[in-house]
Amino acid sequence: MQVAAELSVLRQGHKKLKDDLAPGAENGELLPPPMVVGRQIGKIMDPFYSNPTQTMSVLEHHSRLEIIREQAKPALLAHKEARKMDHGVW
C-alpha cells in the first residue's frame, strides 16, 4: 500500500514537471521552437553555421595554405643549406 502511495506522488510530480516544461502545449507535445527569419541570422546563430558558403570557402583557403606550407618546407631547407654553402665559400 505504501508503494502505491509513493507511486501516485511520483506520478503527480512527473505530471507537474511535464506541464511546467511545455506551457500551452496541446496533447502533451512540445511547442515548436521560434523561427528566425531575416538577414540578421548571423547575429543570433554561431557564425560557423549561419553562413555555410563562407565557412566552406574559409576552410578550403586554410587547407590550401597548410598544404602549401608543408610543400614549402623542403624548399626552405634547401635554400638555407645553399646560403650556408655560399657563406662558407666567401
Image (spheres, grey):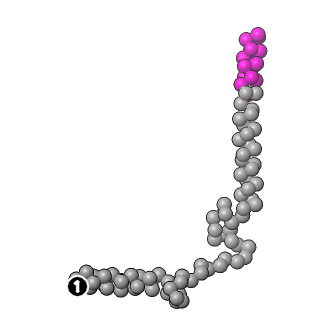
x and y, in percent, of residue 24 in the image: 52, 89
Q: Residue at x 69, y 66 (%)?
A: 50
Nearer to us in this view, 73 or 81? 73
The answer to which image quadrant residue 40 occupies is bottom right
**In this picture, is 4 found above or below 75?**
below
Q: Residue furthest left?
A: 2
Could you tell me what secondary structure mostly forms the magenta stretch? helix
Q: Quadrant of the N terminus?
A: bottom left
Q: Residue at x 54, y 89 (%)?
A: 26
x and y, in percent, of residue 74 in the image: 73, 27
Q: Residue furthest top?
A: 89
The answer to which image quadrant residue 75 occupies is top right
Query: Is residue 88 found left or right of 1 in the rendered image?
Result: right
- How many numbered marks does the figure carry? 1
x and y, in percent, of residue 30 in the image: 54, 82
Q: Residue at x 74, y 14 (%)?
A: 85
Q: Residue at x 72, y 62 (%)?
A: 52
Location of mark 1 (residue): 1
The answer to which image quadrant residue 45 occupies is bottom right
Magenta highlight range: 76-90
Query: Is residue 83 found left or right of 14 in the rendered image?
Result: right
Q: Residues within 10 Å of mark 1 (few under 14, many from 20)?
A: few
Secondary structure under tag 1 reads: loop
Q: Amino acid at mark 1?
A: Met
Q: Quadrant of the C terminus?
A: top right
x and y, in percent, of residue 61 in the image: 75, 49
Nearer to us in this view, 29 or 81? 29
Q: Residue furthest front?
A: 1
